[in-house]
Amino acid sequence: PYKWYVLFFKTILFHLRSMEKTIFLKQVLEQMQQKDSKQNPIAFDIEWRTWNSQNKMGGKLKVAKRAVLCMKSTKQNNIIDVLRSEKKETQRKRPNHFLHRTRNIELSNGTVRKINILLITKFNDKLVVY
């Protein structure tokens, strides 16, 4: 009987250690939206899989270090905003990220990627759990 308790205790410790390295998707989305004291988005490390639903292709593992979530800018009188306001000829479709389960992230080199939140595998070196 004593050996059984020791084995059970070791199994529980193993599961507790592995739980420390996991994070729920809801927590991932909350941490992605965090801002620092200057209202700048906080950088994070993320891994996700690619998927194209039109031709059922994908599965490549993508890694981004020091990425940030793309958000609407709250800065006023920005020269880029002034230039954009002059070119109001075309209207773009408003993306519905909640419906499509996607987010736009800006990589450290400045490029913007659209990722599906259901395909996120790791966030800040923690395994994502649904």
Image (cartoon, rainbow, N blue to C red):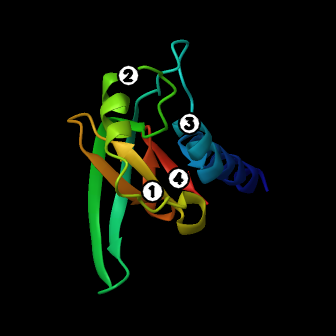
Q: Secondary structure at mark 4?
A: strand
Q: Are marks 4 and 1 in contact (CB under 8 Å)?
A: yes
Nearer to us: label 4 or label 2: 2
Looking at this rendering, what residue extends furthest in the left direction?
A: 109
Amino acid of disc 4: Val
- The mark that comes first in sequence, 4 or 1, is 1
Foreground of the two, 24 or 18: 24
Which residue carries the number 1 mark?
120
- The mark that comes first in sequence, 1 or 3, is 3
| Residue visible at 32% across and 23% down in the picture | 79
Give the distance between the C-alpha atoms of the residues marked 4 and 1, in whole angstroms: 7 Å
Q: Secondary structure at mark 2?
A: loop
Residue 70 position, x and y percent, is 43, 40
- The mark that comes first in sequence, 3 or 2, is 3
Q: Is residue 39 above or below residue 61?
A: above
Nearer to us: label 4 or label 1: 1
32 lies left or right of 13: left
Q: Is residue 23 above or below residue 95?
A: above
Give the distance between the C-alpha atoms of the residues marked 4 and 2, in whole angstroms: 37 Å
43 lies left or right of 129: left
Amino acid of disc 1: Ile
Which residue carries the number 4 mark?
128
Give the distance between the C-alpha atoms of the residues marked 1 and 3, in whole angstroms: 15 Å
Amino acid of disc 2: Asn
Q: Residues within 10 Å of mark 1 (few under 14, many from 20)?
A: many
